Image: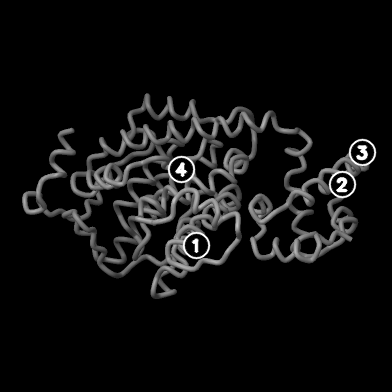
Amino acid sequence: MELRQQLTLPLAARVPVTYRREFVDSYQPNETFLLPQELAEELAELGRLPGQLPAGTYARKVLEQLLIDLSWSSSHLEGNRYTLLDTEELFKSGAAATDSDAVMLLNHKAAIEFLVDAVPTQGLISGLVRNLHAVLMQDLLAEVGALGAIREKVVNISGTTYVPTQVPAVLQEMFERIISTAQHIKNPMEAAFFLWVNLAYLQPFEDGNKRVSRLAANVPLMLYNQAPLSFLDVDREDYALAMMGVHECCDVSMAVDLFDWTYRRSQAKYKVVLESMGSPDPFRVHYRQALNEAVGLVVRSRRPVAQALAGLGLPADDATKFEQLLAQELKALAIFNCARYRLGIKETQAWIDEGRPQG
C-alpha cells in the first residue's frame, strides 16, 4: 500500500530514475530471491504436472484454451479492443487479420505455438526470446530490422518517471545476463517471475517488451511442466502499477502480489481443463511424436497414409492401432485445433478443401 501511494503521486512529485543494473547484478540464483521462498515453493507444488513427462507436456495438453486465454489477456493489457469471445471467433474462423488489433492477437497465437514447439528442444536461450519478439511484433513495427533486434532508440513510458538506458552495448549485456541468470534458477516460479519483471524493466526491444516478458515467463513453466501463466482477469491499472514499482523503485512487492493472484487463477483453470480430459492414453503419449510426424506428412506433404506409416518404422504389434489412431486424428483435424500438430491454418484449410486426401 505504501508503494501504491508513492506511485500515485503526481508525476512532478516523483524523482526521475534511470535503469539500475544492480537489480540484476546483485541477484545470485538460488541464494537471493525476488519471490518469497515459501511462496515460490508453494506455487511450484500447486502447479506441477505429476509424473515424469517430456518438457512442454502441460502446455500442449491445454494448448487450445491457453492460446485464447493468454493471447487475449496479454493483448487486453496492451489496450486491444477485441473481447474474449471476439478472440475465440477470430481463431476459429481462420480469417486473415483486418486491423492492428487482430494482428496483435494472431501474433500472440503464433508466438505461443512457437514456444510450445521450440522450448522443449531449445530451452531458455537468448535466441529463443529474440525470435519470440519477432513473432509477437511481426507487421506491428515500422522497420523489419527491429524484429528480434536489441533496440538503439529511447523508449518512453507514459505516466512514469522511468528513463531507460540508451547504450545498445549495455542493453545487449544485460539482456544476456538476465537470460543466463534465469537459466540457473532452480525453482520454475522464481525463474518465471525473474524473467517477467526483468525483461519488462530492461526493455531490450524497440516495442513489445511487456508482451515478450509475459510470454517468456512461461518458458521455465513449460520446461518444468508447470501450469501456464495466462494473466487471467488482471486489471490494467494494477498491472501498470506493479511494473512501475519495479521501474521506479526496484520494488517487487506489488508485482509479487499480482503474480501470486493471477498464477493461482491460471492454475485453477488449467487443472479443470486437464481433469476434463481424463487420464492420458499411454499409447498416445508414447507415440505422440510419431503421430505429429504422420499428420504433418499427410496434411502438409500430401503423402498417402500408407507411405507416412511406412517411414515411421513402427513395431508390427502397434502399427494397426497407430493407423486407427491416425485416422481418428485426421478425421477430427480442423483449423481451430491444428496447432497441436504445428500446422498452419491456411495449409490445414487447403487440405480440408481438397477433401482431406489420405491416399
Circle 4: is it few (<14), some (14-19), or many (20+) Cα within 10 Å?
Answer: many
Q: Nearer the viewer, mark 1 or mark 3?
A: 1
Precedes in sequence: disc 1 or disc 4: 1
Separation (CA) of disc 3 from disc 4: 41 Å
First of labels 2, 4 by sequence position: 4
Residue 294 or residue 311, whichever sits in front: 294
Per the image, the residue denoted by label 3 is: 317
Horizontal and vertical percent for residue 242?
Answer: 27, 42
Residue located 49% across and 68% down the image:
98
The amino acid type of the residue labelled 2 equals Glu
Helix, strand or loop for disc 1? helix
Q: Crowding near pointer 2: few (<14 within 10 Å), some, many (20+)?
A: some
Q: Which mark is residue 323?
A: 2
How crowded is the residue under tag 1: few (<14 C-alpha within 10 Å), some, or many (20+)?
many
Q: Amino acid at mark 3?
A: Asp
Which labelled disc corresponds to residue 230?
Answer: 4
Q: Disc 1 marks which amino acid?
A: Val
Residue drawn 10% across and 45% down? 9
Rounded to the nearest angstrom, the CA distance separating label 2 from label 1 is 35 Å
First in sequence: mark 2 or mark 3? 3
Cα gap from disc 1 to disc 3, whole angstroms: 42 Å
Judge whether 92 appears above or below 354 on screen.
above
The quarter in which the N terminus is drawn is top left
- What residue do we see at 81% from left, 62% from top? 355
Residues tagged 2 and 4 counted as in contact (Cβ below 8 A) = no
Above or below, 123 against 193 in this view is below
Sequence order check: which comes first, mark 2 or mark 1?
Answer: 1
The spot of residue 283 in percent (x, y) is 79, 36
SS class, disc 3: helix
Quarter of the image where one finds residue 293: bottom right
**For numbered disc 4, what is the local secondary structure?**
loop
Residue under pointer 1: 135
